[in-house]
Image (cartoon, coloured by chain):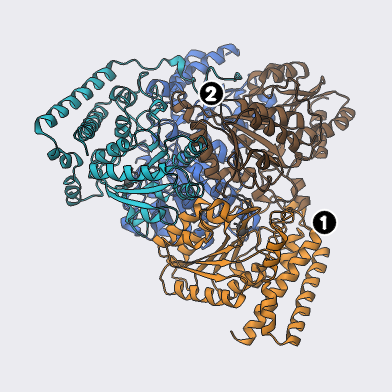
Chain colours: A cyan, B brown, C blue, D orange
């Protein structure tokens, strides 16, 4: 990996970490509410996947702040969204779980486990029909692979040979339930094998993720149809701020945290550069928070806007 | 032209006019559609725009949402209303909400269409009506069509709109004949006064409009009144202006629907009327609807479980007599 | 005792008394339940009777149906109402209909329970209410609980019944405190008169009962009236006797619900009242409900989208003044 | 296979064929209505599967008359059901698609494609918990394997090691759509491979089906968990009486009909015995029809019975 690329990767990971830590703090202070799912521990995976797939459409889950950042959506507009402000990327209506920005080909931010997967398939269908260059990536957890619609999506994507990367973030847990307790095996790639080629990668190693996603991207660009990547990863925090994380032992958490993806990359960088990048990331997050604290709330008069389309609309609802 | 042919014509025109319109569903393509609504589209527009899907209703709507995000204008067919339940998460949690949740950044020009209702002995898992559930979901426009004319114009308009539309047909209407004036100004959001009258406002939609019209002569004769028959067409939004005008004139409301009575769509209309036209009403509103039972296979039981022209007439005549008509 | 503890107690007693009672759902076992309703059941009754399922809502209810066919009495937890949409095919096409379709040969003693409603900034995909859809399905009993007492007795009764029951809780009620008298004769099918009164009948259920009660002093003072507050408890069947008696006395009906107004459950109550208590009503019924919008994340918008004690009081006072109170 | 067993097998197949032919005739005469799905061509599969699994619980689809017969439910009570009579196995309320008879461990008769599969999983769970001897069999078509809940069921059955046989009747068509047009492959067993062992059998050969189901039954009885059987078969008629079967060429139909499962078994039997059995089957069906024609319709007063339970019920609905 080139030096500059590595620095961007590192910077964005640190930005992600700092962002999540700030979100956590402001959740505890009451500035952020609802469900807040932190990506801490999984930043390497989130960032590298987005950077290796910079041009296609992305569909993801409620654990998406870092992916949104890595897509180039500003920390400000994401933090504002978490604060429920009008200046947020979804106008304060979506919140943490529903970041949308079509200008960055980022389509949520979906909080129904597995529900966004068929949406990604449909988008990949559109892209194929339009003979558009870039494919689609859909990111989801191990738990989401238990939803029937996940398999329907594997089948449809394969039957139609769609340019679609399925990226499974296997952190082995769905809230407090270990994947091994509800599936007959723990490698989720196995589920995709009847339908498409699969790749497996250490999701705590951002460089490895970057390479694997690049390989997958090459594959779909060539019109070979969809491909499945399983990235083994580990979240450092509870499922959301409402989860006390009691189902994992201290030992299990130690093993998990020993794989910190940021620590793994750090030695590859010049230490002065690294310190500067970290400082810059902290600064960017601090500014985002400052901005979010002062940003305006949406006007009450906008409460029922956007239920139906504006402007382009051909009718008026009563 | 038959009702199903009118729908087919709307499809043909919309797909010819706009390349981004695609249709998807089970057996819609090569097979020609299980009720022949999509006949010949496959031959004319090809497998890429007339997409045969596997039996995966959740994906049919889920994919339509993604297609719309990707810039297409999908029209999804669900073979029968009952199977739409499999897609309720996609319809309600995704299709109806993404535009709002995204602050309007995502628009979803999607039509989900399906036939519903009691046909002939299709039994409990193939005979339901779900308009009451879907018309209660903010973010969905719910249109119906009771004539070939309404079918043609309604579907064309639905495809044109940039919002998610649920377009509801009735299995027994597909072979209904009627004029289709493609040049007519037909607004599917406006309720139609199918027959003007002065003493009772009969509100209905879909197949029940025909049954009400069949019942009207008997009612008018027995009660010595004239009935105004209104076809709602759009179930959400509701054309309350037309209702209000009619009720101001007649002072009496009868709501007829095929669905089960408890919680049926008609409750919304009657409740709206009693909130907003209380002082116009001279008699308690009457709701005529199906019984609160799954639909039985046996024909005699089946017919007894839903309103028929005869039962509609009898109930209204009895109600009229009890209420001073 | 807290509401969630009351539910937990009902579980413990039912599972102790009858070995065939099992419970299943996401995180209900080892984890203890995402709202702690099933806490300690896993430790006490073991993994075979307290079953942690994968995230497959369709299967949760689908399996419950099969378990009941096989002789068990399953209690299925769906984590949040919105996810229940994934199971609507199983709930409506299977659970509600198999007893009828099989001519009574198959009985399904199943409880499907879930919390619903607007909690605090959970946004559009985690804040819905679906009672109006489910109370409209023949074959389902739909119970709610607004107090620990109702929660305990309601859930026990639901588990005892040999019919499918939808048991609806509210996310904001789990930590509500209240007396639970396990020996009380509490009939969850009967509406409760929470507060007797003479001039206005306020009908509600679930969390809105509390909000109505908070609003009542202001209403009574401003209008100089006394309000009768009724908690429906059971949404299907409906205890129409209690409603009728109250309306005969007060002549005025206000229906308060949290769900979106168009097509909301309250329409059924108001429509029933205008059909059956027309001559008792001295004023147009008033429906207070949520706006027809997906639920926004921002707290100010969120609160503006649903009734609050304050907005309830204001709307009723205004309506009262316009209607001669 | 023993002679007596073979004769029973043959007799039931012919009974099934005759039953279906009579149903077809009376549909055309208007005595039967709604959707009528004939099992003609698939009788060997239906009958052998039931006979090799005589004691467990069975869950199946709308194409179930022959399976119901093979379970021992009388031709009379099935024909009555098709005629919508009170004496039908579901009291005339269910019709062709909804035959229920718990006394024969036969639980439908379900018309939602794939919808009964999780029900079978739940029943197998109950049987395992009850330490009951017999397992469960669920029968479904190739098309049903495209429903998400099918995969959820594979996963659940495997994770819980349930005594459950998944029997896929792969006739390659879902109404007018060939399985190869909507799946990336045509062997449905492939879909089950990640979860459990699979067997494949020629569904037009009743003896082979009997042996395969027997093997599968042994497997589940030993507590090894679920198993999947794919039986390749072919329906001779349209999907239902409403389907003109135009999507299959005469050549394709010829190949299909050449495999008639009844013709395949016939040579194994003494010709006089064969003739007698056929005569007896015809007789039984004729009697069933005669009975059905005269049987009473359900009383109108029973219309709303059985929505909720009777007798055992602890409450009264308004
Ligand atoms: C359909 C649905 N069911 C349940 C939930 C509740 N829920 C939210 S996240 C989650 C766990 C998801 O686990 P996984 O897919 O592994 O993703 P992770 O949180 O580990 O990133 C659950 C059960 C939901 N949001 N949607
Ligand atoms: C959920 C659902 N979707 C669609 C249908 C309509 N439908 C009935 S049978 C059928 C084809 C099923 O094919 P398959 O599973 O292969 O069974 P086969 O009819 O070939 O025996 C379809 C699409 C249905 N009944 N249920
Ligand atoms: Mg996970
Ligand atoms: Mg088939």
User: Which residue is identified by label 1?
Assistant: D30
Does dot 2 land on a helix, a strand or a loop?
loop
Image quarter in which the C terminus of chain B is found: top right
Marking on residue C140? none
Marking on residue A308? 2
- Side of D275 where A247 appears, left or right: left
From the top left corner, tell me how far across and down residue D166 is, in percent: 51, 64
The verdict on label 1 being within 8 Å of ligand 2 is no
- Label 1 Cα crowd, 10 Å radius (few <14 / some 14-19 / many 20+): few
Residue D211: in sight, yes or no? yes
Residue C14: in sight, yes or no? no
Residue D162 vertical placement versus C26 (above, below):
below
- Side of C212 where D289 appears, left or right: right
Total count of labels: 2
Image quarter in which the N terminus of chain B is found: top right
Q: Nearer the viewer, mark 2 or mark 1?
A: 2
């Amino acid at each position: 990996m080139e030096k500059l690329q590595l620095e961007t990767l590192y910077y964005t990971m640190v930005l992600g970490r700092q962002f999540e830590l700030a979100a956590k703090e402001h959740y505890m202070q009451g500035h952020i509410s609802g469900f807040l799912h932190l990506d801490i521990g999984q930043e390497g995976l989130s960032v590298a996947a987005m950077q290796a797939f910079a041009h296609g459409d992305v569909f993801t889950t409620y654990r998406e702040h870092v992916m949104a950042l890595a897509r180039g959506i500003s920390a400000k507009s994401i933090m504002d969204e978490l604060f429920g402000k009008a200046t947020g990327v979804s106008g304060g209506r979506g919140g943490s779980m529903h970041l949308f920005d079509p200008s960055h080909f980022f389509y949520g931010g979906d909080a129904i486990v597995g529900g966004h997967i068929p949406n990604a398939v449909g988008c990949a269908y559109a892209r194929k029909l339009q003979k558009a260059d870039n494919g689609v990536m859909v990111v989801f957890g191990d738990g989401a692979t238990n939803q029937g619609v996940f398999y329907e999506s594997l089948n449809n994507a394969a039957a139609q040979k769609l340019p679609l990367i399925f990226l499974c973030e296997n952190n082995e847990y769905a809230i407090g339930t270990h994947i091994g307790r509800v599936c007959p095996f723990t490698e989720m790639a196995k589920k995709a094998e009847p339908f498409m080629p699969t790749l497996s990668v250490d999701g705590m190693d951002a460089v490895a993720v970057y390479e694997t996603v690049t390989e997958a991207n090459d594959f779909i660009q060539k019109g070979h149809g969809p491909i499945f990547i399983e990235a083994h990863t580990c979240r450092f925090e509870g499922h959301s701020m409402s989860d006390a994380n009691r189902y994992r032992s201290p030992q299990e958490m130690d093993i998990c945290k020993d794989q910190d993806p940021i620590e793994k990359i750090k030695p590859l960088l010049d230490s002065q550069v690294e310190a500067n990048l970290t400082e810059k990331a902290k600064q960017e997050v601090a500014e985002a928070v400052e901005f979010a604290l002062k940003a305006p709330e949406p006007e009450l008069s906008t409460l029922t806007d956007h239920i139906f389309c504006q402007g382009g609309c051909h009718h008026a609802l009563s | 032209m038959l009702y199903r042919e009118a729908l087919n014509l709307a499809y043909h025109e919309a797909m010819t006019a706009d390349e981004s319109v695609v249709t998807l569903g089970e057996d819609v393509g090569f097979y020609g559609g299980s009720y022949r609504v999509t006949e010949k589209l496959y031959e004319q527009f090809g497998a890429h725009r007339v997409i045969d899907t596997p039996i995966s209703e959740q994906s049919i709507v889920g994919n339509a949402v993604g297609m719309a995000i990707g810039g297409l204008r999908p029209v999804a067919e669900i073979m029968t209303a009952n199977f739409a339940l499999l897609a309720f998460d996609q319809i309600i949690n995704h299709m109806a909400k993404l535009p709002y949740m995204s602050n309007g950044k995502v628009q979803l020009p999607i039509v989900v269409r399906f036939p519903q209702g009691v046909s002939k002995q299709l039994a409990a898992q193939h005979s339901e009506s779900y308009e009451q559930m879907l018309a209660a979901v903010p973010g969905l426009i719910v249109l119906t069509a009771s004539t070939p004319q309404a079918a043609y114009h309604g579907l064309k308009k639905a495809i044109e709109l940039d919002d998610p539309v649920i377009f509801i047909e009735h299995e027994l209407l597909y072979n209904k004949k009627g004029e289709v004036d493609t040049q007519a100004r037909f607004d599917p959001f406006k309720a139609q006064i199918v027959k003007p009258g002065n003493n009772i406002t009969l509100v209905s939609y879909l197949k029940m409009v025909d049954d009400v019209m069949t019942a009207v002569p008997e009612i008018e004769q027995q009660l010595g009144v004239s009935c105004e028959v209104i076809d709602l067409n759009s179930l959400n939004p509701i054309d309350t202006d037309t209702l209000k005008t009619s009720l101001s004139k007649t002072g009496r409301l009868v709501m007829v629907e095929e669905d089960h009575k408890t919680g049926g769509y008609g409750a919304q209309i009657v409740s709206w009327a009693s909130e907003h036209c209380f002082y116009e009403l001279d008699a308690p509103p009457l709701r005529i609807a199906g019984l609160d039972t799954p639909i039985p296979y046996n024909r005699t039981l089946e017919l007894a479980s839903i309103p028929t022209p005869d039962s509609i007439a009898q109930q209204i005549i009895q109600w009229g007599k009890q209420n001073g008509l």
